Amino acid sequence: MPVRIVIGAQWGDEGKGKIVDLLSADAQYVVRYQGGANAGHTLKFDNTTIVLHLIPSGLFNGNSKCIIGNGVVIDPIALVEELEEVQEHDVDLEGRLFISSSAHLILPYHKVLDKVKEKSRGSDAIGTTGRGIGPAYVSKVSRIGIRMDDLLDENALNSKIRKNLKDINVALENVYGEDPLDADKMIEELKPAIEKVKPFVCNTSQKLHQALIDGESILLEGAQGSLLDVDHGTYPYVTSSCPTAGGACTGSGIPPLAVTHAMGITKAYCTRVGNGPFPTELDDEYGETLRKNGQEFGATTGRPRRCGWLDLVALKYAVQLNGMNELALTKLDVLDDFDEIKVCTEYELDGKTSRVFPLDTENVEKATPVYKAFEGWKSSTRDISNFEDLPEKAKNYISFIEDYTGVKFNIISTGPKRSETIVR
Ligand code: IMP
């Protein structure tokens, strides 16, 4: 049975939530493997819109078991808010949701550190979501992190929080000039959330290993995107985890050789939130139209997204980096009204053209995109669910991308609803 990783092929916000929701109808397990509540996966069905930040997007389609894997960093207060929202939609989470005992916690001090560090960076700020992601991964790799299994021993948990806070308060007061945080208050505030989260904690790697033995179908859901990967993205303007395919294995406990499919999700154009290089960014009326027609505002922070043409140099890099053998194209309908649509096929750098995505951010910043222009199809693709019904010009656009990347689109999305999808 397939073990499929669903990965953002750009800078996040590619519409992974919708694709995971669709694919999860046939999956026995859906697993989030990295990131935290910085993600916002929007699902639309039956007149319902729900934005999930931590819970896998497989919860609402079929009966798949949903796992929050060891690679995710979990803010218990944000998780409880989400659990309550989901329960309002009559979803019974017992036997459906499992949280890795090895996943690390985001504690209130991580969120405070995220904000003060961003403030102190001034004009070099990353533009983080402020959800404490970077500082929580710092705690993890510094081996002072607190894991979900620590929730099971209250005394040990509280003494770890106190110990960590001692050091953090020194930094807050002396480096950042902020007030220290009160450990007792923090522990009290966390208590109710911890009690609600505890029953879901278990050994999720073992569950997945058994699922592999039983030949069950597993979907691994990435958050953010390949170009935000801490190793392979536009460092330092990245998130602090590995959304790429390798991260799916380390973040879940699934061995690499068990993976059968790597599906990349790309929008028909590009967006980015936060700071950092974006070669095809449009600071003009076209960018404005993409933002307006595509409703390009952050699902987590509400920030307007930066918008631009599709960047095939970056997409091809993502395909190679992840070994993508499937692609899904989202938001094709957002291009319906354009007279002309462009795609970047090469970068011009120091007088030379190249199809290689530079590994150093400075060169990505300096790259001038070389474009190929397509005539717009100027008709609505909204609601189309059969490939043959697409306008010829849209089909040409799609096949150009397929030829460039060497990968076919299995799924083309023409609107936010489940029904607005072409499956090939
Ligand atoms: P952090 O993950 O909050 O530390 O933010 C680091 C960078 O990743 C910032 O540029 C964020 O805007 C970006 N980022 C984090 N999560 C998402 C996401 O889900 N979609 C798009 N960008 C994201």
Image (cartoon, helix red, strand yellow):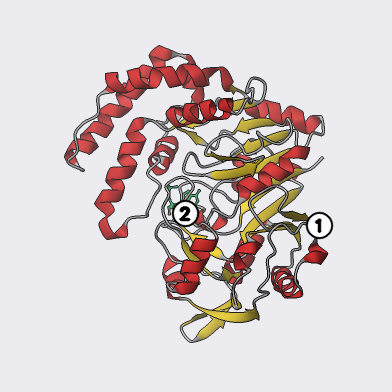
Mark 1, secondary structure of its residue: loop
At 70% from the left edge and 51% from the top edge, which residue is drawn? Answer: 262
| Location of the C terminus (image quadrant) | bottom right
Could you tell me if the residues under marks 1 and 2 are in contact, i.e. CB atoms within 8 Å? no
Decide which of 242, 224 is in the foreground and name it: 224
- Residue 297 — which label? 2
Point out residue 147 in the picture as x, y percentages from the top left corner: 48, 27
At 82% from the left edge and 34% from the top edge, which residue is drawn? Answer: 215
- Residue 235 — which label? none
At 44% from the left edge and 58% from the top edge, which residue is drawn? Answer: 235
Q: Identity of the amino acid at label 2? A: Phe
Mark 2, secondary structure of its residue: loop
- Residue 424 — which label? 1
State which tag comes first along the sequence, 1 or 2.
2
Q: Identity of the amino acid at label 1? A: Arg
Point out residue 97 in the picture as x, y percentages from the top left corner: 62, 26
Residue at mark 2: C-beta within 8 A of ligand 1: no
Asked whether residue 279 appears in the rendered view, the answer is: no
Decide which of 91, 410 is in the foreground and name it: 91
At 63% from the left edge and 68% from the top edge, which residue is drawn? Answer: 336
Q: How many marks?
A: 2
Residue at mark 1: C-beta within 8 A of ligand 1: no
User: Residue 62 vs residue 303: left or right?
Assistant: right
Point out residue 339 in the picture as x, y percentages from the top left corner: 60, 78
Residue 14 in the image: above or below residue 181 = below
Asked whether residue 155 appears in the rendered view, the answer is: yes
Residue 378 in the image: above or below residue 325 = below
| Location of the N terminus (image quadrant) | top right
User: Residue 287 vs residue 123: left or right?
Assistant: right
Other-residue count near label 1 (Cα within 10 Å), few / some / many at <14 / 14–19 / ≥20: few
Closest to the camera, between mark 1 and mark 2, is 2
